[in-house]
Protein backbone atom coordinates (compact mmCIF):
# COMPACT_ATOMS: atom_id res chain seq x y z
CA UNK A 1 0.00 0.00 0.00
CA UNK A 2 2.83 2.35 0.85
CA UNK A 3 5.18 1.32 -2.00
CA UNK A 4 6.10 3.45 -4.96
CA UNK A 5 7.34 1.52 -7.98
CA UNK A 6 9.75 3.13 -10.43
CA UNK A 7 11.11 2.12 -13.82
CA UNK A 8 13.47 1.76 -15.52
CA UNK A 9 16.28 1.09 -13.06
CA UNK A 10 18.75 2.66 -15.46
CA UNK A 11 18.45 4.66 -18.65
CA UNK A 12 20.90 5.70 -21.33
CA UNK A 13 19.90 8.52 -23.69
CA UNK A 14 21.72 10.41 -26.39
CA UNK A 15 22.20 14.14 -25.98
CA UNK A 16 19.11 15.95 -27.26
CA UNK A 17 16.87 12.95 -26.71
CA UNK A 18 13.88 12.53 -24.41
CA UNK A 19 14.29 10.76 -21.08
CA UNK A 20 11.17 9.18 -19.59
CA UNK A 21 10.92 7.70 -16.11
CA UNK A 22 7.73 6.13 -14.81
CA UNK A 23 6.31 5.65 -11.33
CA UNK A 24 3.24 3.95 -9.92
CA UNK A 25 1.61 4.05 -6.51
CA UNK A 26 -1.19 2.26 -4.67
CA UNK A 27 -2.31 4.58 -1.89
CA UNK A 28 -4.98 6.94 -3.23
CA UNK A 29 -4.53 9.15 -0.14
CA UNK A 30 -1.21 10.47 -1.44
CA UNK A 31 -1.58 14.16 -2.29
CA UNK A 32 1.88 15.25 -3.37
CA UNK A 33 4.18 13.73 -5.98
CA UNK A 34 7.70 15.17 -6.24
CA UNK A 35 10.71 14.19 -8.31
CA UNK A 36 14.20 14.47 -6.88
CA UNK A 37 17.54 14.64 -8.66
CA UNK A 38 20.67 13.37 -6.94
CA UNK A 39 24.27 13.80 -8.05
CA UNK A 40 27.03 11.58 -6.58
CA UNK A 41 28.05 12.69 -3.11
CA UNK A 42 25.14 15.11 -2.79
CA UNK A 43 21.76 15.02 -1.13
CA UNK A 44 18.64 14.74 -3.32
CA UNK A 45 17.32 18.05 -4.60
CA UNK A 46 13.72 18.78 -5.54
CA UNK A 47 13.36 18.97 -9.31
CA UNK A 48 9.64 19.35 -9.89
CA UNK A 49 6.45 18.31 -8.10
CA UNK A 50 2.75 17.93 -8.82
CA UNK A 51 -0.45 17.69 -6.82
CA UNK A 52 -3.31 15.42 -7.98
CA UNK A 53 -5.63 18.22 -9.04
CA UNK A 54 -3.68 18.73 -12.29
CA UNK A 55 -2.61 16.27 -14.98
CA UNK A 56 0.57 17.93 -16.14
CA UNK A 57 3.18 20.37 -14.92
CA UNK A 58 6.04 21.77 -16.94
CA UNK A 59 9.14 23.61 -15.75
CA UNK A 60 11.63 24.31 -18.49
CA UNK A 61 12.77 21.01 -20.00
CA UNK A 62 11.13 18.97 -17.22
CA UNK A 63 7.49 17.81 -17.32
CA UNK A 64 5.47 15.68 -14.94
CA UNK A 65 2.51 13.81 -16.39
CA UNK A 66 0.01 12.58 -13.82
CA UNK A 67 -2.71 9.96 -14.38
CA UNK A 68 -4.86 9.81 -11.28
CA UNK A 69 -7.13 6.98 -12.45
CA UNK A 70 -4.15 4.78 -13.33
CA UNK A 71 -2.24 5.86 -10.22
CA UNK A 72 0.81 6.61 -12.32
CA UNK A 73 3.05 9.59 -12.91
CA UNK A 74 6.06 10.14 -15.07
CA UNK A 75 8.97 12.51 -15.58
CA UNK A 76 9.89 13.64 -19.08
CA UNK A 77 13.20 15.38 -19.69
CA UNK A 78 13.23 17.06 -23.08
CA UNK A 79 16.45 17.82 -24.95
CA UNK A 80 18.43 15.76 -22.44
CA UNK A 81 21.92 17.06 -21.66
CA UNK A 82 25.02 15.35 -20.24
CA UNK A 83 24.58 17.55 -17.15
CA UNK A 84 21.26 15.79 -16.52
CA UNK A 85 23.16 12.56 -15.80
CA UNK A 86 22.14 11.73 -12.23
CA UNK A 87 19.88 9.47 -10.22
CA UNK A 88 16.22 10.41 -10.20
CA UNK A 89 13.78 9.45 -7.47
CA UNK A 90 10.03 9.79 -7.59
CA UNK A 91 8.15 10.05 -4.32
CA UNK A 92 4.65 10.24 -2.93
CA UNK A 93 3.41 11.79 0.28
CA UNK A 94 0.31 12.70 2.17
CA UNK A 95 -0.12 15.40 4.76
CA UNK A 96 1.19 14.41 8.17
CA UNK A 97 3.05 11.31 7.01
CA UNK A 98 6.48 10.43 5.72
CA UNK A 99 7.52 10.60 2.08
CA UNK A 100 7.71 7.25 0.26
CA UNK A 101 10.41 7.07 -2.39
CA UNK A 102 10.79 4.93 -5.47
CA UNK A 103 14.03 2.91 -5.82
CA UNK A 104 15.57 5.40 -8.24
CA UNK A 105 16.61 5.56 -11.90
CA UNK A 106 20.19 6.13 -12.93
CA UNK A 107 20.20 8.33 -16.03
CA UNK A 108 23.21 8.64 -18.30
CA UNK A 109 23.09 11.15 -21.15
CA UNK A 110 25.76 10.49 -23.74
CA UNK A 111 27.47 13.50 -25.36
CA UNK B 1 20.73 28.74 7.96
CA UNK B 2 19.78 28.70 4.31
CA UNK B 3 19.51 24.94 4.06
CA UNK B 4 19.45 21.71 6.03
CA UNK B 5 22.79 21.27 7.76
CA UNK B 6 24.19 17.89 8.82
CA UNK B 7 27.25 16.99 10.83
CA UNK B 8 29.63 15.33 10.69
CA UNK B 9 29.85 15.01 6.92
CA UNK B 10 32.01 11.91 7.34
CA UNK B 11 32.38 9.56 10.30
CA UNK B 12 34.57 6.51 10.52
CA UNK B 13 34.10 4.35 13.58
CA UNK B 14 34.92 0.91 14.87
CA UNK B 15 32.38 -1.85 15.17
CA UNK B 16 30.67 -1.70 18.55
CA UNK B 17 31.09 2.03 19.10
CA UNK B 18 28.18 4.47 19.44
CA UNK B 19 27.76 7.35 16.99
CA UNK B 20 25.66 10.50 16.96
CA UNK B 21 24.62 12.30 13.80
CA UNK B 22 23.24 15.82 13.94
CA UNK B 23 20.71 17.62 11.78
CA UNK B 24 19.86 21.32 11.76
CA UNK B 25 16.67 21.76 9.74
CA UNK B 26 15.62 24.88 7.87
CA UNK B 27 14.36 27.45 10.35
CA UNK B 28 10.59 27.26 10.81
CA UNK B 29 10.20 23.83 9.26
CA UNK B 30 7.81 21.76 11.34
CA UNK B 31 8.63 18.34 9.94
CA UNK B 32 11.97 16.53 10.07
CA UNK B 33 12.88 13.21 8.48
CA UNK B 34 15.80 10.81 8.61
CA UNK B 35 16.56 8.50 5.69
CA UNK B 36 19.38 6.05 5.08
CA UNK B 37 20.99 5.46 1.69
CA UNK B 38 23.35 2.57 1.12
CA UNK B 39 25.84 2.83 -1.75
CA UNK B 40 23.99 3.01 -5.06
CA UNK B 41 20.68 2.28 -3.41
CA UNK B 42 17.41 4.08 -2.74
CA UNK B 43 16.20 6.05 0.26
CA UNK B 44 15.22 4.01 3.29
CA UNK B 45 12.88 5.80 5.69
CA UNK B 46 14.00 5.76 9.31
CA UNK B 47 12.01 8.23 11.42
CA UNK B 48 9.75 11.26 11.03
CA UNK B 49 9.03 14.13 13.45
CA UNK B 50 6.05 16.43 12.91
CA UNK B 51 5.60 19.32 15.32
CA UNK B 52 4.72 18.16 18.82
CA UNK B 53 3.23 14.86 17.66
CA UNK B 54 4.74 11.53 18.62
CA UNK B 55 7.42 10.61 16.06
CA UNK B 56 6.83 7.91 13.47
CA UNK B 57 9.58 5.42 14.32
CA UNK B 58 8.31 2.66 12.06
CA UNK B 59 11.40 2.71 9.84
CA UNK B 60 14.05 2.25 12.50
CA UNK B 61 15.78 -1.07 11.67
CA UNK B 62 16.56 -2.12 15.25
CA UNK B 63 16.51 -0.89 18.83
CA UNK B 64 20.14 0.20 18.38
CA UNK B 65 18.77 3.17 16.46
CA UNK B 66 17.10 6.12 18.17
CA UNK B 67 16.48 9.77 17.42
CA UNK B 68 15.31 12.82 19.24
CA UNK B 69 14.36 16.31 18.24
CA UNK B 70 14.92 18.98 20.84
CA UNK B 71 12.83 22.14 20.98
CA UNK B 72 11.22 21.34 17.67
CA UNK B 73 14.45 22.11 15.85
CA UNK B 74 17.75 20.23 15.97
CA UNK B 75 17.64 16.44 15.73
CA UNK B 76 20.17 13.81 16.70
CA UNK B 77 20.21 10.27 15.32
CA UNK B 78 22.05 7.85 17.61
CA UNK B 79 23.30 4.43 16.58
CA UNK B 80 24.48 2.26 19.45
CA UNK B 81 26.92 -0.64 19.13
CA UNK B 82 27.48 0.03 15.44
CA UNK B 83 27.68 -2.86 13.00
CA UNK B 84 29.30 -2.98 9.57
CA UNK B 85 25.86 -3.13 7.92
CA UNK B 86 25.14 0.31 9.40
CA UNK B 87 27.63 1.81 6.94
CA UNK B 88 25.64 4.18 4.72
CA UNK B 89 24.85 7.82 4.10
CA UNK B 90 22.34 9.15 6.60
CA UNK B 91 20.20 11.91 5.11
CA UNK B 92 18.15 14.42 7.03
CA UNK B 93 15.33 16.42 5.43
CA UNK B 94 12.85 19.01 6.59
CA UNK B 95 9.63 20.54 5.36
CA UNK B 96 6.98 23.04 6.36
CA UNK B 97 3.52 21.52 6.40
CA UNK B 98 0.39 23.24 7.58
CA UNK B 99 -3.26 23.60 6.75
CA UNK B 100 -3.42 20.09 5.35
CA UNK B 101 -0.94 20.89 2.58
CA UNK B 102 2.12 18.68 2.26
CA UNK B 103 5.21 20.85 2.01
CA UNK B 104 8.32 20.50 -0.13
CA UNK B 105 11.04 18.31 1.30
CA UNK B 106 14.56 19.73 1.51
CA UNK B 107 17.54 17.43 2.08
CA UNK B 108 20.89 18.00 3.68
CA UNK B 109 24.12 16.74 2.14
CA UNK B 110 24.16 13.70 4.40
CA UNK B 111 26.50 12.14 6.94
CA UNK B 112 28.57 9.30 5.51
CA UNK B 113 29.11 6.62 8.17
CA UNK B 114 31.74 3.94 7.74
CA UNK B 115 31.92 1.16 10.33
CA UNK B 116 35.19 -0.76 10.25
Image (cartoon, helix red, strand yellow):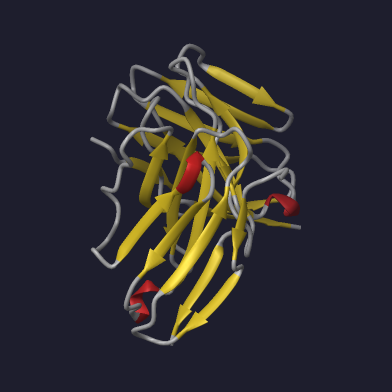
Say whether residue A74 is left or right of residue B46: right
Image quadrant in which the C terminus of chain B is located:
bottom left
Q: Residue at x 40, y 41 (%)?
A: B49
**Residue A44 in the image: x percent, y percent?**
58, 50
Quadrant in the picture for residue B36? bottom left
Q: Position of residue B71 (x, y in %)?
A: 49, 42
Q: In the picture provided, is A78 more to the left or to the right than B63?
A: right
Q: Position of residue B64 (x, y in %)?
A: 28, 68
Q: Quadrant of the N terminus of chain B?
A: top right
Q: Quadrant of residue B84?
A: bottom left
Seen in the picture, residue B87 relative to B22 is either above or below; the reply is below
Please provide percent x and percent y for residue B2. 73, 43
Residue under the point 24% across and 64% down: B62
* Residue at horizontal 35 percent and vertical 77 percent from the top: B82
Q: Nearer the viewer, residue A29 or B56?
A: B56
The residue at 43%/32% (across/down) is: B51
Amino acid sequence: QQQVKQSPQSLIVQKGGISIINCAYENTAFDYFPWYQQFPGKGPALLIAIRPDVSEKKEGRFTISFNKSAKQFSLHIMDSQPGDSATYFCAAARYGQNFVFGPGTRLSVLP
Amino acid sequence: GAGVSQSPSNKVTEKGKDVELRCDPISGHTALYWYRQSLGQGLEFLIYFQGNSAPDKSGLPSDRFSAERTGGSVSTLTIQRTQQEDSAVYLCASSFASGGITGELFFGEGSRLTVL
